[in-house]
Amino acid sequence: MTLDELPDLLTIKELSIWARIPVNTLYEWKAKGIGPTPLKMGKHLRYSKERVRAWTLELEAAAA
């Protein structure tokens, strides 16, 4: 599944499945300020598809 096929706002579980990163790791990264910055909507976290895209581009650039 490509990022374009996902909804504009992802739940942490959707991001976990897409990126193949455990949910617990995403929570740890959030606490450490690592990875895409989530939006807090009440008590729920959502990840903007555009922020996730920007984050993956940053990872690709750092690996080059």
Image (cartoon, rainbow, N blue to C red):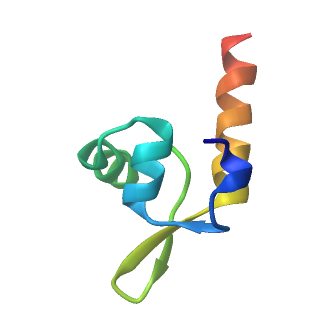
Q: Is residue 50 visible?
A: yes
Q: Quick one: which residue is furthest to the bottom in this view?
A: 42
Instruction: Please state the horizontal and vertical placement of residue 17, each as a whole percent of the image.
Output: 41, 45
Q: Compared with residue 64, is residue 48 higher up or lower down, i.e. above or below?
A: below
* Residue nearer the viewer, 28 or 8: 8
Side of 10 relative to 45 (left or right): right
Q: Quick one: which residue is furthest to the top in this view?
A: 64
Instruction: Please state the horizontal and vertical placement of residue 2, each as a whole percent of the image.
Output: 67, 42
Q: Residue at x 37, y 57 (%)?
A: 13
Q: Which quarter of the figure is the C terminus placed in?
A: top right
Q: How many marks?
A: 0
Instruction: Please state the horizontal and vertical placement of residue 61, each as a whole percent of the image.
Output: 75, 22
Instruction: Please state the horizontal and vertical placement of residue 44, each as a whole percent of the image.
Output: 38, 79
- Answer with the quarter of the image where residue 62 lies: top right
Side of 53 relative to 35 (left or right): right
Q: Residue at x 66, y 36 (%)?
A: 56
Q: Compared with residue 51, is residue 21 higher up or lower down, i.e. above or below?
A: above
Q: Is residue 34 visible?
A: no
Q: Residue at x 29, y 49 (%)?
A: 23
* Residue nearer the viewer, 33 or 23: 23
Q: Quick one: which residue is furthest to the left in this view?
A: 24
Side of 22 relative to 10 (left or right): left
Q: Residue at x 45, y 56 (%)?
A: 14
Q: Which quarter of the figure is the N terminus placed in?
A: top right
Q: Compared with residue 58, is residue 8 higher up or lower down, i.e. above or below?
A: below
